[in-house]
Image (cartoon, coloured by chain):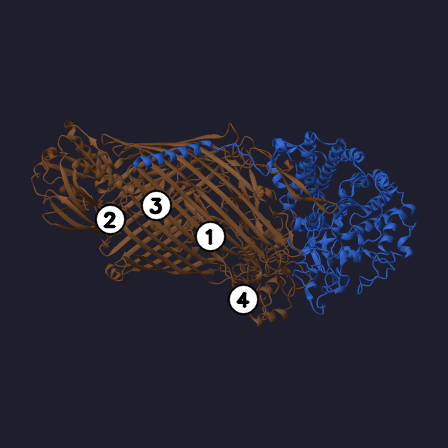
Chain colours: A blue, B brown
């Protein structure tokens, strides 16, 4: 009997020894590739490139960059730092600064990783390889351009860095970064296909048109007028770099059924249900399904829309009436901004009135302006990019356009005027074309006024740019390059005329802003970044 | 098994017997915790033989019992034939009959299970018994009970000066045959003072033993074994089962709070099922600071699914001396939990414990009255140059007239029932013991709406079996935990409800849930009532099987195989709730399922050797090998737009691309180890112990995989020295001890030494279809062990006849090669895994004292524990790291405690424009009277990053616990206080800032002391709208205004109980009956009044998790009624 136990025991111990000694310590994950087995196919390289695309820009920066400008007010929270940046009440610890920095360098890393490894993929067509490299180089140039615009001198990262390099790197002079960006764009524009050369399935990829558009923008920001002109002309005067044209409907330009239209040069790609943005949850009228308002257009933006007769509202003979302020205005106002009495189109085609003036609503007062409430703090909501086919919580798969043909026309007009070359021909090609498309019919609004000097034309072109591109995230960059921030970002940003007559003529005081031209034209290098890398210098004034 | 010895050595057994007695004594203690069981037999025998030789009868007895015979064939007539018919008799009766009439006359002695036979005269080696050989055998019977008349089964009864002894049976009864009617009996039992009784011819002797006040020879569970407390020379705190009795703890962690000095347990949240943070001796690493949990010798169990009433003891291993045997995972300390076993030779005991009570939610904060809030909002707007008031005076009048609605936060919580029930059956005979228990806990959630809360079922069966030199131990525990939760996040629900002023209603007369100007989208009540649920259903099987074989008396080999099989499921549905006038919750109608299964296996093989040489040299060796491995896999299926009623798929149902298969979510790791320990002590006076572990982990690459972790401990019982004789006699015993060793930490993710790429869906899109993206995790190929050099010096004292026991410890720990993600600049472009960088020093002390006074009427026991730890970053590669936590930052800098808060220092409030002129203010801001003024540290005339001060840190210091037990007759009373002496607590959000970012729309009573021209001596600055210059100056520039004194003293538990007198209980058919009332969290003393000071800012790794705000679940006070019944 005891022998039996001994037998059981010896087996038990034998089993234990077996179990103890055989356990493997060399383990590899089953859901991930390692560096050794990743770079084996062009489709794997493509997915790295897709990651780089996804890091290019995001919807929150797209919209809330308007909140940094005089076009809109971020009245709730401090989304993407817009409230702090607009009011000038930030310091180097502001989260947005670090995030913009981190996000863009993360995007650069994906590009560099692809560029340094894609040659390891053996089974791949060289043309495709070069095109993918060019796409990555575009994104890398775009990221550097954005960083340079905000921060000035920035570390130029054209190779994948080691940690030690990243910890000790110095800022590259802005001029060198710019040169890198322009040189890259020059080279890749020759490699990238035109939009027609891509298949339908590839719509949304970077084209040579996009490279030219970015080059034009980079020159524009520098005031390299001649280069802007030549870049724009290579898109305006020829279809060799892609056939671009204004889309006939300004309103339709931003609707989901018209994605990939003739005006779209490069847009951020979104996919219904699978990759969506939801910023309208805090921008649309509350009665249209928004939760609250965090970003509202200002009275200053509304005032910049001219009358149908081509005159600015404060111009003699404008026929502007404060009692009916939205009557006879540039049709783009209605396509962009929701105001009191707005005729809101529902998805089904029906429409209803939006009541914003306090006490005006016959039944549901949710949209009404009430000080300190969660409805609009300015008396306005946003319509442009509202997606009638939105999903839950106003989530949308609508693409957000980064470069469109109207921008090319506006850049062209501006550069020509700065060169003193604005004339009826250029005007007709640019401003007139845009106003016609917007729905202007009055001749004074459409036709070139030869009596205007360069300064007056500059005001008109700049204003045209503001309204045409309103709520598309570009205004703040124009303000900075025109050096008008101390004028437009100082003092009160206003809302509609829903307030007591005093102090500001009945217009709501929405947000008090300060702008110090000695420091605020460049963002400070993020605090934490300089704590890690003491070689990073700081911008003047910070 | 017969041992034949020659005549020459006939005295040998008796020399051995003396030694054996000592061993028996020791083994009895050991058997108490169920490791050995070779002592104390009183097996009854039945025997029926016809005309059989003595030789064969002996064989038969040996076969059917545990008794073995030792004799010299020369002196015993083995061929004599006998016929016997004996039923249920003691061995003595059997032997008496067997050798009745034998020639030469045979004498016998029974020691444990060994029966020594000899020629009767030969016994006379022992001079004392020689004289008595001719005396007649007398039989004494009796019973052994404790002061409460409870029998003491297994008590030892030994005839003094001889080796003749028996043990008491199930009912505490014994029968002993004595050769001398004038003998003295020595009765001993674990935990009781030994007693000597002179027989003086009595044949019935009933003995009452008094409980021993000294736990001197308590057995302490240590890594892979046990030690007598008197021999422990490392820092180990043992917490006994009484710490878990009568408290409404829903889990073991909660029950451990305040029980051991420097075992810091903090709650992050009072919500049912919420985890608690556990830490031993403070922060010594920059990553995870949680201790290693070992349950019944197996690493990897879940302390929170364990039934607290199943616990027999918890050992907290704090220093290298005790913990080094757990090597690479021991640097944060080790918690060893041992579960209860049945007791040998004891009758079946059935025990029921029940506790039923309710948890009452308690808010530390109160909003101001509605109309008052409206006035305050106008004041803030006015102060911010707003063009119009927010509320007209008519509205304010109306609010006042209407009175206040119920505060949303109070409307969504209620008192909730909590029940704890436990039933256990235990017992044992001389070969095996059993303990079976069933537990049930049901803690209802305090949230309103459909029933929510935590339910746990526990089942445990612990068995031990012995067959001579073999021993099997089998423990199996099953727990099912079910948590029903709402579909949202508790912190969101709480804070939403918290922020609404009292002039809004949450639900109208028609039952419509209402949105308002603060909650535009939905309100918490609607979500709780109708918004769906999350149901967790977690099964946990934990067990081990251990087999042990005594190769010789000194040499044991043991194999252990155990582990944990864990299966967690989550079924969740979000249901659509429409709000009025607008807003909708759960429009996606999600139906989600997640399932994860994990398996932890642990296999160990050990050799143990213990030997005593010359009665003064005690040696113990342990060596072993083990493997631990972990694997888990999970799947998740997420669907949107499912049927609103059933949650089943319908036409527009979509599968979310976050759904995952099991290969997308799996992991594996493995650890191979060799370990050992050697202990030596001389005369129980000088102690030396060394231990080590050699670990190889799959988390590191080949070549860096193996790490060695040694320790050495020394002990010195000074009080046994001649020169301390006086001390020993007047005071008691004093033992000094010291240990030093290296402990490791490998608490990092798997596969970090390899750069990995992973793909994910819908990273981007082309032509309106999603395309996949690839993400990457960069490697640190050189990642390896973290090492903590740990020194511990301590003293243990048992003073004044063991009335006062005192333990003091000082420790100093330096952790180097700390695993921490490096400071990665943004330009690098991605995060990096952990690197071996940095060094942290952590030192501290602790005191634990117990004083007992058991008088005739009053019995007092008071236990105090107090500890403090302080850490300092010694090296971080010359770098420093600041991490923002909301308005403040946390600092990692050489020479400073880890995670010290950094921010501006408040210098009062500006009172006038004159004061502001020329004063330093934050860059770019213009301030007005009533705004915060800050200290210009570098006196450069501007407040910026260069003016930041280093403040305290959130880790608690001077943590203490006090337990007081008092019993008077049948009434018992106990009190448990717990607290923290010093802590910096960060509080923010709506709790500090009025109308926080416009998210909050009400002020609270504690905020009313704000600056106005009439209240210049205010605590807080003036009111101003979010986004204004004043608000930015006062609240967006993080200052010590957000830091509060988090010291507190809390009455954790009070209990008053009454036990029925023994006789009454027995008449009712019970062995004992006690009922009691119990209360928890009844009183809190602290300097901060508007928030629960116990709330921690740490996450489970003791890393920062953000400041405390209005997001916390309310603190619960518990009131309950309990009964304990024993059958």
* Image quadrant in which you'd find residue B1023: bottom right
Q: Chain of mark 1?
A: B
Q: Which residue position holds label 1? A: B481
Q: Residues within 10 Å of mark 4 (few under 14, many from 20)?
A: some
Q: Nearer the viewer, mark 1 or mark 3?
A: 3
The Cα atoms of the two marked residues, 3 and 4, are separated by: 56 Å
**Depth order, front residue of A362/B1015:** A362
Q: Earlier in the sequence, mark 2 or mark 4?
A: 2
Q: Earlier in the sequence, mark 2 or mark 1?
A: 2
Q: Which residue position holds label 4? A: B406
Question: Are marks 3 and 4 in one subunit?
Answer: yes
The Cα atoms of the two marked residues, 2 and 4, are separated by: 61 Å
Q: Nearer the viewer, mark 4 or mark 1?
A: 1
The answer, for residue A250, to whether it is visible in the render is yes
Residue name at image x 9 percent, y 47 percent:
B200
Question: Are marks 1 and 3 in one subunit?
Answer: yes
Q: Residues within 10 Å of mark 2 (few under 14, many from 20)?
A: many
Q: Secondary structure at mark 4?
A: loop
- Quadrant in which the C terminus of chain A is drawn: top right
Query: Residue B506, how many percent across, how many down?
Result: 58, 65
Q: Which residue position holds label 3? A: B463
Q: Earlier in the sequence, mark 3 or mark 4?
A: 4
Q: Are marks 3 and 4 in contact (CB under 8 Å)?
A: no
Q: Are marks 2 and 3 in contact (CB under 8 Å)?
A: no
Q: Chain of mark 3?
A: B
Q: Which residue position holds label 2? A: B153
Q: Nearer the viewer, mark 2 or mark 3?
A: 3
Q: Earlier in the sequence, mark 4 or mark 1?
A: 4
Question: Are marks 2 and 1 in one subunit?
Answer: yes
- Quadrant in which the N terminus of chain A is drawn: top left
């Amino acid at each position: 009997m005891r022998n039996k136990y001994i037998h059981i025991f010896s087996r038990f111990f034998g089993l234990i020894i077996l179990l103890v000694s055989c356990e493997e310590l060399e383990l590899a994950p089953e859901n991930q590739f390692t560096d050794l087995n990743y770079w084996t196919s062009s489709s794997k390289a493509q997915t790295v490139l897709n990651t780089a695309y996804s890091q290019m820009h995001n919807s929150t920066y797209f919209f809330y960059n308007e909140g940094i400008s005089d076009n809109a007010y971020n009245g709730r929270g401090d989304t993407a730092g817009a409230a702090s940046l607009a009011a000038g009440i930030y310091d180097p610890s502001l989260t947005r600064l670090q995030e913009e920095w981190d996000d863009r360098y993360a995007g650069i890393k994906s590009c560099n990783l692809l560029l340094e490894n894609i040659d390891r993929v053996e089974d791949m067509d060289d043309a495709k390889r070069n095109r993918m490299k060019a796409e990555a180089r575009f994104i890398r140039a775009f990221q550097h351009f954005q960083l340079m615009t905000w921060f000035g001198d920035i570390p130029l990262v054209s190779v994948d860095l080691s940690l030690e390099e990243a910890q000790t790197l110095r800022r590259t002079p802005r001029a060198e970064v710019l040169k890198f960006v322009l040189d890259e764009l020059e080279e890749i524009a020759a490699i990238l296909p035109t939009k027609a050369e891509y298949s339908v399935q590839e719509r949304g990829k970077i084209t040579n048109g996009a490279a030219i558009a970015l080059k034009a923008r980079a020159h524009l920001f520098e005031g390299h007028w001649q280069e802007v002109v030549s870049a724009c002309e290579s898109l305006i005067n020829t279809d060799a770099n892609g056939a671009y044209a204004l889309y006939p409907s300004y309103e339709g330009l931003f609707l989901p059924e018209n994605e990939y239209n003739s005006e779209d040069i490069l847009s951020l790609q979104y996919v219904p249900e699978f990759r969506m943005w939801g910023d309208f949850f805090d921008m649309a009228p509350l009665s249209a399904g928004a939760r609250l308002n965090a970003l509202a257009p200002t009275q200053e933006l509304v005032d910049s829309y001219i009358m149908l007769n081509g005159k600015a509202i404060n111009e003699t003979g404008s026929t502007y009436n404060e009692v009916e302020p939205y009557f006879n205005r540039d049709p783009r106002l209605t396509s962009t901004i929701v105001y009191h009495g707005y005729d809101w189109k529902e998805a089904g085609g029906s429409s209803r009135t939006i009541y914003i003036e306090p006490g005006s609503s016959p039944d549901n007062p949710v949209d009404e302006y009430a000080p300190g409430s969660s409805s609009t703090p300015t008396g306005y909501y946003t319509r442009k990019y509202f997606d009638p086919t939105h999903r839950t919580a106003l989530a949308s798969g609508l693409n957000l356009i980064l470069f469109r043909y109207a921008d090319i026309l506006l850049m062209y007009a501006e550069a020509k005027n700065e060169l003193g070359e604005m004339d009826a021909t250029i005007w007709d090609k640019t401003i007139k074309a845009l106003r016609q498309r917007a729905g202007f019919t009055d001749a004074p609004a459409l036709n070139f006024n030869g009596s205007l000097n360069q300064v007056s034309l500059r005001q008109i072109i700049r204003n045209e740019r503001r309204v045409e591109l309103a709520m598309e995230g570009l205004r703040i960059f124009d303000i900075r390059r025109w050096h008008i921030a101390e004028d437009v970002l100082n003092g009160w940003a206003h809302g509609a005329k829903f307030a007591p007559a005093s102090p500001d003529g009945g217009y709501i005081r929405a947000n008090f802003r300060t702008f110090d031209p000695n420091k605020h034209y460049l963002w400070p290098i993020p605090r934490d970044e300089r704590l890690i890398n003491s070689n990073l210098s700081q911008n003047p004034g910070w | 098994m017969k041992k034949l010895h020659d005549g020459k050595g006939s005295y040998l057994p008796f020399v051995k017997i003396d030694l054996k007695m000592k061993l028996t004594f020791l083994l009895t203690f050991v058997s108490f915790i169920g490791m050995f069981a070779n002592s104390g037999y009183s097996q009854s025998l039945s025997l029926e033989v016809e005309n059989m030789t003595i030789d064969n009868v002996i064989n038969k007895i040996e076969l059917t019992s545990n008794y073995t015979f030792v004799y010299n064939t020369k002196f015993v007539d083995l061929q004599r034939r006998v016929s016997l018919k004996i039923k249920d008799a003691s061995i003595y009766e059997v032997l008496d009959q067997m050798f009745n009439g034998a020639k030469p006359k045979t004498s016998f002695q029974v020691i444990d299970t060994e029966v020594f036979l000899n020629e009767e005269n030969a016994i006379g080696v022992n001079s004392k018994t020689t004289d008595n050989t001719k005396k007649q055998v007398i039989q004494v019977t009796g019973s052994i009970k404790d002061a409460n008349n409870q029998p003491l089964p297994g008590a030892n009864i030994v005839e003094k000066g001889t080796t003749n002894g028996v043990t008491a049976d199930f009912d505490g009864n014994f029968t002993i045959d004595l050769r001398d009617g004038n003998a003295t009996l020595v009765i001993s039992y674990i935990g009781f003072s030994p007693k000597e009784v002179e027989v003086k011819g009595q044949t019935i002797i009933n003995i009452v033993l008094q409980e021993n006040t000294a736990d001197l020879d308590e057995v302490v569970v240590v890594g892979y074994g046990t030690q007598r407390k008197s021999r422990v020379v490392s820092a180990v705190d043992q917490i006994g089962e009484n710490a878990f009795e009568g408290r409404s703890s829903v889990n073991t962690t909660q029950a451990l709070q305040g029980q051991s000095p420097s075992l810091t347990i903090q709650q992050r949240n009072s919500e049912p099922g919420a985890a608690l943070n556990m830490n031993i001796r403070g922060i010594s690493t920059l990553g995870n600071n949680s201790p290693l949990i070992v349950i019944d010798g197996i690493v990897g169990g879940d302390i929170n699914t364990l039934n607290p009433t199943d616990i027999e003891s918890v050992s907290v291993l704090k220093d290298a001396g005790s913990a080094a045997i757990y090597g690479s995972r021991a640097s944060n300390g080790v918690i060893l939990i041992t579960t209860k076993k049945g007791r040998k030779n004891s009758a079946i005991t059935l025990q029921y414990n029940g506790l039923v009570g309710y948890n009452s939610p308690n808010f530390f904060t109160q909003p101001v009255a509605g109309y008052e809030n409206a006035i305050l909002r106008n004041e803030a707007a006015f102060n911010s140059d707003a063009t119009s008031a927010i509320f007209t005076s008519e509205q304010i009048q109306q609010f006042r007239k209407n009175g206040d609605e119920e505060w949303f936060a109070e409307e969504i919580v209620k008192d909730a029932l909590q029940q704890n029930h436990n039933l256990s059956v235990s017992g044992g005979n001389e070969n095996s013991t059993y303990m079976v228990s069933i537990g049930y806990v049901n803690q209802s959630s305090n949230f309103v709406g459909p029933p929510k809360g935590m339910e746990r079922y526990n089942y445990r069966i612990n068995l031990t079996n012995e067959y001579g030199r073999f021993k099997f131990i089998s423990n199996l525990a099953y727990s099912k935990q079910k948590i029903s939760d709402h579909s949202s996040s508790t912190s969101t629900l709480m804070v939403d409800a918290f922020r609404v002023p009292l002039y809004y209603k949450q639900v109208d007369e028609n039952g419509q849930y209402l949105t308002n100007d603060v909650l535009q989208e939905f309100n918490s009540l609607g979500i709780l009532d109708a918004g769906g649920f999350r149901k967790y259903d977690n099964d946990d099987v934990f067990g081990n099987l251990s087999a042990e074989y005594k190769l010789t008396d000194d040499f044991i080999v043991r194999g252990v195989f155990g582990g944990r099989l864990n299966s967690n499921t989550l079924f969740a549905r979000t249901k659509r709730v429409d709000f009025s006038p607008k807003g909708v919750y759960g429009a996606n109608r999600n139906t989600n399922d997640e399932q994860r299964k994990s398996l932890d296996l642990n296999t160990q093989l050990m050799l143990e050797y213990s030997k005593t040489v010359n009665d003064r040299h005690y040696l113990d060796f342990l060596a072993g090998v083990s493997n631990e491995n972990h694997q888990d896999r999970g799947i998740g299926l997420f669907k949107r737009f499912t049927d609103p009623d059933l949650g089943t798929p319908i036409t527009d149902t979509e599968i979310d691309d976050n759904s995952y298969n099991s290969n997308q979510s799996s992991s594996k790791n493995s650890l191979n180890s060799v370990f050992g320990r050697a202990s030596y002590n001389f005369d129980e006076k000088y102690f030396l112990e060394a231990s080590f572990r050699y670990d190889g982990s799959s988390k590191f690459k080949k070549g860096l995989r193996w790490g060695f972790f040694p320790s050495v401990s020394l002990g010195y019982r000074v009080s046994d020295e001649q020169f301390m004789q006086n001390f020993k006699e007047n005071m008691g015993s004093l033992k000094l001890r010291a240990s030093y060793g290296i402990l490791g930490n490998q608490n990092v993710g798997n596969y970090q030494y390899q750069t990995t790429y992973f793909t994910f869906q819908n990273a981007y899109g082309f032509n309106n279809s999603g395309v996949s993206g690839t993400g990457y995790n960069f490697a640190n190929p050189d990642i390896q062990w973290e090492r903590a050099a740990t020194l511990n010096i301590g003293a243990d004292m048992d003073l004044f006849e063991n009335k006062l026991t005192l333990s003091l410890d000082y420790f100093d720990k330096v952790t180097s090669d700390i695993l921490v993600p490096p400071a990665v600049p943004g330009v690098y472009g991605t995060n990096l895994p952990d690197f071996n960088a940095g060094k942290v020093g952590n030192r501290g002390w602790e005191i634990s004292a117990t004083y007992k006074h058991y008088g005739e009427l009053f019995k007092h026991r008071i236990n105090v524990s107090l500890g403090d730890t302080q850490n300092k970053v010694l090296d971080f590669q010359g770098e420093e790291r600041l991490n923002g936590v909301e308005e403040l930052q946390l600092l990692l800098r050489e020479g400073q405690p880890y995670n010290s808060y950094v921010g501006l220092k408040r210098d009062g409030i500006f009172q006038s424009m004159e004061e502001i002129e020329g004063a330093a203010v934050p860059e770019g801001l213009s301030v007005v009277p009533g705004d915060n003024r800050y200290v210009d540290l570098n006196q450069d005339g501007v407040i910026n990053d260069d003016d930041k001060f280093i403040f305290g840190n959130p880790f608690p210091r001077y943590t203490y616990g006090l337990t007081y037990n008092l019993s008077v007759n049948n009434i018992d009373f106990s009190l448990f206080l717990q607290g923290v002496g010093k802590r910096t607590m960060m509080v923010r959000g709506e709790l500090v800032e009025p109308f926080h970012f416009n998210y909050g729309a009400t002020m609270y009573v504690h905020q009313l002391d704000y600056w106005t021209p009439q209240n210049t001596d205010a605590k807080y600055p003036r009111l101003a709208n979010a986004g204004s210059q004043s608000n930015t100056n006062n609240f967006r520039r993080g200052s010590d205004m957000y830091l509060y004194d988090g010291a507190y003293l809390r009455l954790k538990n009070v209990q008053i109980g009454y036990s029925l007198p023994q006789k009454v209980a027995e008449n009712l058919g019970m062995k004992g009956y006690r009922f009691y009332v119990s209360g928890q969290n009844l009183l809190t003393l602290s300097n901060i009044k508007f928030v629960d000071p116990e709330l921690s800012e740490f996450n489970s790794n003791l890393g920062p998790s953000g400041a405390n705000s209005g997001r916390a679940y309310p603190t619960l006070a518990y009131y309950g009624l309990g009964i304990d019944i024993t059958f």
